[in-house]
Each structure stands twice: as C-alpha cells, then as structure tokens.
C-alpha cells in the first residue's frame, strides 16, 4: 500500500468527524431554539435519525462491497452536500427534518468504507488505533467549539462549515483513488502474538460481548446528545458554554483511546469490559440527574472512560477474530444505528406515557442499559 494512502484516509476521516459533529450534535439546539422542541421531541428526532442510519448503513456497506469503495464515498459526500445545502435554505420543521435525513443517509456511505480502507494492508492493528484517535480528536474539538460558532455566527454556520468540509472531502476522494496501489483488497497483516489471546472459541465469545456492548453504548450516547439542550437550559448554559462543559466526555474518550492503543493489558480481560459497562450505566444516569455542575463534570469523566473502552473493545475484538471489509463495516455501523434508535425511542416513549415524571426518560433508558449489562454477563457465563 502506498505510504500516502492512509494519511489521506485519516484526513478525510478527521474532516468528516468534525463536520458531522458540528451538524448533528447541534441539530437539537437548532430545533429547540428555532422550533421550540423539548426533550421528548428531540428524542423522537434522534430515534428517527438512528432508525434510518441502522438500515441505510447496512445497505451502504453492501453497496460499497459490490460497486467499490470510491464510488460509495463519492455518492456519500454528494448526498451529504445536497442535504446540507438544502437545510441551509429551509426554515420549516418538515424541511429541516427531511434535510437531516438526507445528510444522515449520505453519511452511511462514508464510515463503513473508511473503516475498510484503513484496516486493509500492512500494520492494520496500528492503523485502527490511529483511526480511533483521529475521529475522536476531531469529534471532541468540534463539540467543544461548535456552540461558540453558533453564538458568534448563528445557526447557519452549522450548515455552511460542514458543507465546505464535505466538498473538500469529496475532492480528496478523487486524489485518493489516483494514489498508486490504492486498490482495495490487499491482505491485512496479522496481529502480532498477544499473550492474553485465548482459544478461538473464547475469543469469539469476547467478540459477541463487545458487539452487544457497543450498541448499548450508543443507546446512552444518542440519548444524551438529544437531551443536552434541556440539560443546558437546566443549568442556564448558552450553546457556547454547553459546548465547553458537555464536551468533556469526548476528550476523556480520546484519552482512553490513546491509553488502550498503547497498553494491551486490557485485552481479553472480562473484568475490564464489565466494569466499563457498569460505569456506563451509573455515569449516564448521573449526568442526566446531576444536581450541580461538579457532579455533571465528574459523571462525564466516568462516561468518557466507559464509552472509550467499550467502543475500542468492539473494534479490537472484531479485528482480532475476523476481517473488516466494507460489508462488515456496514454491519458494525448498523449496530451503532440500532443503539442510536432504541435509546432515544425508549426515552421519548417514557416521557410520553409518564409525563408527570421529568426523569422518566432517564430511568427508562438506565433500565434498558441494565438489561444490556445482564446480557453481557449472560454471554460471559455461557462462553465459560
């Protein structure tokens, strides 16, 4: 594989992570401020986006496998650009929701392909670690400054800035496919011997546990993102201040990725995965019912560590036990979409049918996460 290939992939990945966070994470503030959406309505919107992502990413991964990775990337960025351009000119609830759905579908063609491209060829294990750190760093930076951009330049900035980034990425795809040796299909270099690696059957069991845990992590993430505007209102934070305070968990997740990349001692250790899942449940509830900013900040630190280990486990155990081509990337993203749908849907339903309790959504999703923790322990016991 040409030495310039992966750096261009990482550049596209970082730009895409930044653009999608600026748009999707602050979309809920837009609907709150422009259309008066409350937590229940934002959760419903998040569930719709997650449902579309679940099915579209699965099909997009299959399409990329048949039609080629570069074709899928061009379609994805083209669709995203069209959705962002339309959203910048629409000022109705239906119009903005339709535009968000279009951007969402375009995004489904991007992440499965980037995962596949980065994972092919030599030094795949190192590349996946850099991949995680790259998107997480751009994600944290975008969430941190996104609120400031909105306060300084208005909500139109959440359309125009991502649109500019998407057009740059589209241009980079044409550069990428002209790099010598850029044809997909190079065999991946096997992972070096890991003294912690168990027998194949037990390794598969860890893969199943990680595949269960990761969608539940996204149940928590997408539910949290949808209600951040309500949380900001509770503590009287502007979008700018909310971006500063509520992006903390993203930076902790980034730091966790770096540690896990450099230190292999967590590999195939069930106590690490189950502790992270238990911490996820507690931190999620603590963030949403935090009585003050000190609790909110401490809970976010725990949340970021838990999310980091669960996500990294999912990718690591997948890579250690199977290949990571475009179709498998689509399945991985579809599982994330399932979590993005289920969490907000449960939260919205709880607020609809238990409207007398302002924390009904928090309790319902926390209960769902506890069920996931039980499932994780069940898989572990069965595997033993």
Image: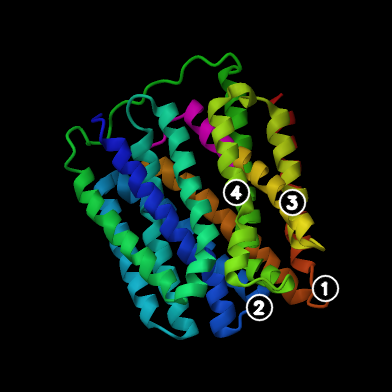
- Residue 309 lies left or right of residue 73; in this view the side is right
**As displayed, is residue 262 above or below residue 175?**
above
Q: Residue 245: image x %, image y %?
A: 64, 59
Question: Residue at label 2?
Answer: 38
Q: Which residue sits at x=43%, y=63%?
A: 104
Q: Are marks 2 and 3 in contact (CB under 8 Å)?
A: no
Residue 373 visible at all: no
Q: Residue 139: image x %, image y %?
A: 50, 52
Q: Residue 2: image x %, image y %?
A: 23, 30
Residue 299 circle label: 3
Q: Which residue sits at x=42%, y=72%?
A: 157
How much space separates mark 2 and mark 4, taking CA atoms?
25 Å
Q: Nearer the viewer, mark 1 or mark 2?
A: 2
Dot 1 surroundings within 10 Å: few (below 14), some, or many (20 or more)? few
Q: Are marks 4 and 1 in contact (CB under 8 Å)?
A: no
How much space separates mark 1 and mark 2, taking CA atoms?
14 Å
Please tell me whether the stretch drawn in magenta is mainly helix, strand or loop. helix
Q: Nearer the viewer, mark 3 or mark 4?
A: 3
Find out whether residue 17 is within the magenta segment: no
Q: Which residues are magenta?
A: 311-325
Q: Which residue sits at x=44%, y=35%?
A: 130
Q: Secondary structure at mark 4?
A: helix
Q: Which residue sits at x=46%, y=57%?
A: 55
Q: Residue 342: image x %, image y %?
A: 62, 59
Image quarter in which the N terminus is found: top left
Question: Residue at label 4?
Answer: 215
How much space separates mark 3 and mark 4, taking CA atoms?
20 Å
Mark nearer the N terminus (3 vs 4): 4
Residue 357 circle label: 1
- Residue 99 lies left or right of residue 200; in this view the side is left
Near-viewer residue (225 or 220) = 225
């Amino acid at each position: 594989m040409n030495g310039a290939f992966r750096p261009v992939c990482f550049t596209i990945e970082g730009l895409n992570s930044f653009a999608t966070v600026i748009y999707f994470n602050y979309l809920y503030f837009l609907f709150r401020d422009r259309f008066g959406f409350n937590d229940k309505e934002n959760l419903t919107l998040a569930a719709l986006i997650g449902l579309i992502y679940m099915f579209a990413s699965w099909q997009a991964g299959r399409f990329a496998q048949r039609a080629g990775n570069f074709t899928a990337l061009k379609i994805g960025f083209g669709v995203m650009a069209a959705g962002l351009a339309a959203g910048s000119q629409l000022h109705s609830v239906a119009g903005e929701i339709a535009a968000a759905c279009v951007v969402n579908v375009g995004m489904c063609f991007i992440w499965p392909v980037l995962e596949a491209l980065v994972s092919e060829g030599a030094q795949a294990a190192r590349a996946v670690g850099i991949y995680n750190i790259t998107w997480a760093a751009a994600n944290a930076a975008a969430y941190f400054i996104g609120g400031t951009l909105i306060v300084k330049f208005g909500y139109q900035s959440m359309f125009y800035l991502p649109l500019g980034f998407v057009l740059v990425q589209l241009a980079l795809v044409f550069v990428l496919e002209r790099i010598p040796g850029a044809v997909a299909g190079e065999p991946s270099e096997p992972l070096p011997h890991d003294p912690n690696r168990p027998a194949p059957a037990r390794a598969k069991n860890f893969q199943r546990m990680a595949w269960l845990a990761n969608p539940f992590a996204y149940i928590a993430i997408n539910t949290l993102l949808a209600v951040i505007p309500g949380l900001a209102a509770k503590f009287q934070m502007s979008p700018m201040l909310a971006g500063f305070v509520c992006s903390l968990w993203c930076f902790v997740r980034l730091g966790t990725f770096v540690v896990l990349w450099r230190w292999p001692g967590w590999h195939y250790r069930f106590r690490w995965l189950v502790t992270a899942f238990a911490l996820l449940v507690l931190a999620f509830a603590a963030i949403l019912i935090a009585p003050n900013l000190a609790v909110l900040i401490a809970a976010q630190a725990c949340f970021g560590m838990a999310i980091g280990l669960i996500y990294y486990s999912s990718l690591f155990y997948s890579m250690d036990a199977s290949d990571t081509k475009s179709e498998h990337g689509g399945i991985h993203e579809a599982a994330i979409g399932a979590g993005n749908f289920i969490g907000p849907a449960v939260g919205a339903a709880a607020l609809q049918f238990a409207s007398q309790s302002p924390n009904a959504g928090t309790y319902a999703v926390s209960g769902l996460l506890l069920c996931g923790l039980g499932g994780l322990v069940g898989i572990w016991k069965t595997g033993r």
